[in-house]
Amino acid sequence: MSDISTNTRIDSGDAGFGDYFALLKPRVMSLVVFTALVGLLAAPVPVHPLLAFAAILFVAIGGGASGALNMWYDADIDRIMRRTQSRPIPAGKISESETFAFGMFLSVFSVIMLALASNFVAAALLAFTIFFYVVVYTMWLKRWTPQNIVIGGAAGAFPPMIGWAVATGGVSVESVLMFTLIFMWTPPHFWALALFMKSDYRDAGVPMLTVTHGRKATRAHIIIYTVLLAPIAVGTGFTSIGGPVYLATALLLNAVFLKGAWDIWRRAEATAEADDYKTEKRFFAFSIFYLFAHFVAILVEKGLAPYGLGGWS
Amino acid sequence: MSSNGNSNSAPRVEHEIHGRRRSRNVGLGIVLGSFVFLVMGMTYVKLTAQNAAMAAEHSKKVAAEAAAQGTATSTSSQEISD
């Protein structure tokens, strides 16, 4: 029996399942799933568990689809940046045209399915989120203005609002506050990353604040946004999704976050470089925990409500 | 199969390509199968909820009609007695 193969080339048609899954940016998708789930569960209207599961799944697919379209459009700079060189397109596993088709199909599919699983308000919000992330952020803002992170952050802030809309069919103060919490959190989170991933953005020509306005200005921007974020995070505690547990969590987390931002602001670039951006890296890691803990606290308040302990009533 | 050393590399590359294709096909199969079950489940939940809502609306309508009929009967019997 002969077993001779002359075709040893692995082209895009030979990409594995995991490569397609990687196009959906699983790490970003996990944040989308978590915050959308909190928005859905925190809402005052109960949703059937299967419909809730389906809705969150389609929101996740929509978020993933926008990630795939982002990888399609940004393939040129992904090849330059060290952090993104292992993504499926720069790694040569999947072609750009295939990624575009994949992202477009999943975008339309997720919006239609979310409309069928829940309602048109939630589906419209998901469609707008995909549009905002792909067109407004990726195609327009990202390579044009150093405020790209600020405005583009809105795309990542929509999921809890979509989750809330799945349950209630509308938008309310609570869902807007959850949106604002993520929206205001995004700039300090990404600018801290930009401070210690400096060469990546500069090499790719992305006008990050660190590249256009310098590192001192970036440090100042981090503390400004952290100061603006604190009252929103704490203020959410006085709404129907807040309560004593949330308020205590928010007060503590914002005190630590503000201290971190203050430390970053006060640091000289030479000191930061000398200790390999230890403070900036710690602030970045804490920022992930900061957001996660706020949303967990909202869930805790909701979980305690049946026992007469959650919320302010 | 040949037993010389050169033939070892070819089957290994062949196996990797097949492995990738298999992972993609199996993954897609699982995704499509799960999607079918999800749509079935969603349909069942939606129809059950819709039926329950229609049943509740129907019983409310019947109760309202019965109440209206009862009022009409008592009014007409009162008119007769007057």
Image (cartoon, coloured by chain):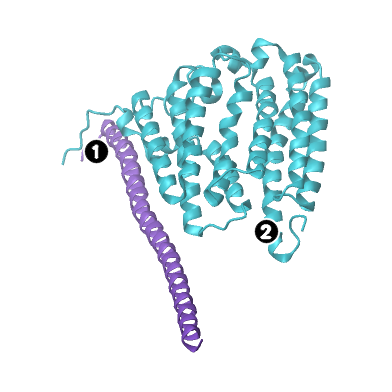
Whether residue A278 is visible to the viewer of this picture, yes or no, is no
In the image, which lettered chain appears purple?
B
Q: Are marks 2 and 1 in contact (CB under 8 Å)?
A: no
Q: In this figure, which residue is indicated by the disc labeled 1?
A: B3
A3 on left or right of A57: left
Label 2 CA crowd tier, 10 Å (few <14, some 14–19, many 20+) = some
Q: Position of residue A89 (x, y in %)?
A: 42, 25
Give the CA distance from mark 2 to mark 1: 66 Å
Name the residue: 47% across, 38% down. Answer: A124
Q: In this figure, which residue is indicated by the disc labeled 2?
A: A303
Name the residue: 47% across, 75% down. Answer: B68
| Front residue of this view, candidates A261 and A240 | A240
Amino acid at dot 2: Gly
Of helix, strand and loop, which one carries label 2?
helix
Label 1 CA crowd tier, 10 Å (few <14, some 14–19, many 20+) = few
B24 on left or right of A244: left
Quarter of the image with the N terminus of chain A is top left
In the image, which lettered chain appears cyan?
A
